[in-house]
Every structure is written in structure tokens, then in C-alpha cells.
Amino acid sequence: MGQTLMSCVFYAYCNTLCAHCNCITRKFVPLQKIIRMKAKIAVAADHAGFYMKEFIFSTLEKEGYEVRNFGTFSDNSVDYPDFAHTLAQAVSAGEYDYGFLFCGSGNGVNMTANKHKNVRSALCWESEIARLARAHNNANVCAIPARFISANETASIVTAFLNTSFEGGRHEQRVQKIC
């Protein structure tokens, strides 16, 4: 006779601030939705950002992040919007916490990602810009100019982006006006 495995789900109260009237609501939610050890991350690139994306993808996987690679899967010439739209749709839908986009200058993928609701993509070429994008703008996508920065600089940008929390406060009102 086979064994039956029992599954236990623990619940906790979670207070959330209503965006419309600023009231606090209390929800009873599964604890695993509150406590997640590592963020879910999406990565994508065009041909110019392919090698940098692959480097970051493997680095994040080694660090224990759940990472999805949205392509491209070679350095053959492709159109960046095809990959930026796919990643941005996944972040917009809440399937991933953060996204990292790579192209030659970072501009094309950044502009494309920002067309999507709930996506706040920031063009980051140094770690301080990435830190400020998270802290002040609550950015959830980081666009990186792969042709202009080194792998070490890119790793520093990704680390700063992932290790910085949104400060809220005076910045919250400004972020709400972005819509």
C-alpha cells in the first residue's frame, strides 16, 4: 500500500493599504505568499544583449533565484520588442517580481517595457542609478545597455537593484501618478 503525504498550509493575517482610500484592510492569506526567500525574476535580451543576459541568467540561478529566460537564445539578429514585450507582460501580470532587459543601448527595451501597465522600467548604467530606481521609483524592470558596460558592472547593477527596497513615503505619491 502506498503512503499518503499530508500537506499543511499555514495562514497569517496580512495588512494592506488600499490604493484608493488609504484604509488598511486585513486579509487571511497563506503564509508562503508572505514569506518568499528569493524573488522570481525574468530576463530577456536582443542579439546585442544576448551574452550579458546569459551571464546574469546563470549568475542568478546559481544564487538560488527562480529565473525564467524569455530569450533570445543566440546572438543572431532579432527585433528587441519581441522579447521586451513578452517579459513586460509577465511582470505586468505579476508572474515575476522583477525583470532584467538587455540590448545594445538599453533604450529600446526600456521604452518597450514601459508601454505595459504596472511596469516601471529604468535604464540603469551604474549601480547607484539602479539603487535609486528601486528606492525612489519602485522600478520592477531594469534595462541594461550591454554594449556600454562590463560584466562586473552589470553584476553590480543587478545586485543593487535586487537588494534595494522601495522607500515609499514621499515617493509613493509620485509613483502613483505614473499610471
Image (cartoon, helix red, strand yellow):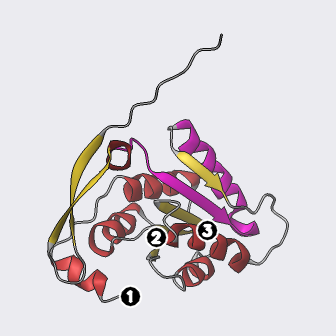
Please tell me whether mark 3 sits on a helix, a strand or a loop: helix
Q: Which of the two discs, 3 and 1, labels the residue nearer the N terminus? A: 3
Give residue 98's position: percent from left, percent from top: 47, 61
Q: Is residue 24 above or below residue 170?
A: above
Q: Which residue lies under the disc numbered 1?
A: 179
Highlighted magenta segment, given as a residue range = 35-62
130, 25: nearer the viewer: 25
Q: Position of residue 80 (x, y in %)?
A: 71, 76
Q: In 3D space, how far apart are the residues under numbered discs 3 and 1 (Cα atoms)?
A: 19 Å
Q: Is residue 55 magenta?
A: yes
**Kind of residue at disc 3:** Leu
* Amino acid bearing label 2: Cys
Mark 3 crowdedness (10 Å alpha carbons): few <14, some 14-19, many ≥20: many
- In the rendered view, would you say 49 is above or below 68? below
Q: Residue furthest front?
A: 1
Position of the N terminus by quadrant: top right
* Residue, disc 3: 87
Front-most of residues 16 and 102:
16
Q: Is residue 62 above or below residue 137?
A: above
For residue 22, what is the image quadrant? bottom left
Extreme-top residue of the structure: 1
In percent of width and height, residue 88 lies at 57, 73
Which type of secondary structure does the marked residue at label 1 adopt?
Answer: loop
Closer to the camera: disc 2 or disc 3?
Answer: 3
Kindly give the residue lying farthest to the right in the view shown. Answer: 76
**Mark 3–mark 1 contact, CB under 8 Å?**
no
In the picture of the structure, the residue carrying the numbered disc 2 is: 124
Mark 2 / mark 3, whichever is N-terminal: 3
Relative to 105, is 172 on the left or the right?
left
| Tag 2 secondary structure | loop
Residue 148 appears in the rendering: no
